[in-house]
Image (cartoon, rainbow, N blue to C red):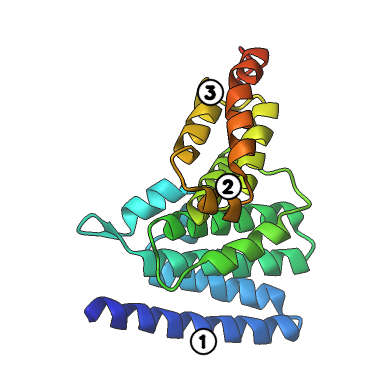
Amino acid sequence: MFQRDYIMRMIEQMAQVSGSLLGLRKAGKQEEALQVIEELLDKHFRMNARLLRSLSEEDLIRMMSRSGEPDTAMLHALALLFKEEADLQGDLGREPAAFQSRLKSLHLLLRISSLGAEPSPDDTAEEQLRMLLPYELPTATKRLVAGWREEQGKYAQAEDLWYELQDDGQLQPGELDQFYNRLLPLPDVALERGGLSRSELLEAAKSVPAKAHSNKGEVTQS
């Protein structure tokens, strides 16, 4: 009960914050809105805003955990603030800053989705992915999205990302094979719902060794 009340309070607070930021944005006061976000990051997350931006999502999850359990409500709120920041930076034509804030938001949303956060962050994550379509995503982001698509049961989309990583030379030996091995035990109806037929899966799994061999030694660091 306490956890549910806590989550509801966080949702209400974020709704109020989003409303205030939207009002400033409509009034053309993007810089003022960015300052509000800066103050909120300092006040509610008890650490310097610049430090928050520099930490990886793994570090943020570790720091925002209670008794070893990630505080998904707090992490969700942080992800939404980074999203708002990205929108404002985009309004001001600061594309590199907007890109970094949106990536940070997306990474947190994907991680808390995998942790089973309620309410689900998936719609917001999809929105961030749409906003990032014009850009080449970093390897770490592609990996997170591939894993998330698999968790969603969107297997064809996950497969596309694994092949994109392979084309980038960013797959370790056996990774694509492991992906197909996770799908093989699934029922046909689940595969088809995810965009793959059993025959397509078997054919793709059979072709992995040849493709992996052709890319041998091409793995690079990103």
Q: Examine the rendered structure and indicate whether residue 173 appears above or below residue 6.
A: above
Image quarter of residue 28? bottom right
Q: Examine the rendered structure and indicate whether residue 14 appears above or below residue 186.
A: below
- The disc, 2 or 3, on the residue closer to the chain's N-terminal end is 2
Within 10 Å of the Cα at label 1, are there few (<14), some (14-19), or many (20+) other Cα atoms? few
SS under mark 2:
helix
Which residue was labeled with disc 3?
172
Tag in front: 2 or 3: 2
Q: Examine the rendered structure and indicate whether residue 57 appears above or below residue 65.
A: above
Which residue was labeled with disc 2?
155
Within 10 Å of the Cα at label 2, are there few (<14), some (14-19), or many (20+) other Cα atoms? many
SS under mark 3:
loop
- The disc, 2 or 1, on the residue closer to the chain's N-terminal end is 1
Q: Please, what is the three-letter code of the amino acid marked with disc 1?
A: Gln
Please report the residue visible at 56 percent of the width from the left and 44 percent of the height from the top. Answer: 146
Relative to the observer, which residue lies in front, 92 or 78? Answer: 78
In the displayed structure image, the side of residue 196 where residue 110 appears, left or right: left
Which residue was labeled with disc 1?
16
Q: Say if residue 168 shows up in the picture.
A: no
Tag in front: 3 or 1: 3
Please report the residue visible at 38 percent of the width from the left and 70 percent of the height from the top. Answer: 73
- The disc, 3 or 1, on the residue closer to the chain's N-terminal end is 1
Image quarter of residue 26? bottom right
Within 10 Å of the Cα at label 3, are there few (<14), some (14-19), or many (20+) other Cα atoms? some
Please provide percent x and percent y for residue 112.
43, 59
Q: CA distance from mark 3 to mark 1?
A: 45 Å
Please provide percent x and percent y for residue 62.
33, 51
Q: Please, what is the three-letter code of the amino acid marked with disc 2?
A: Tyr
Please provide percent x and percent y for residue 184.
48, 37
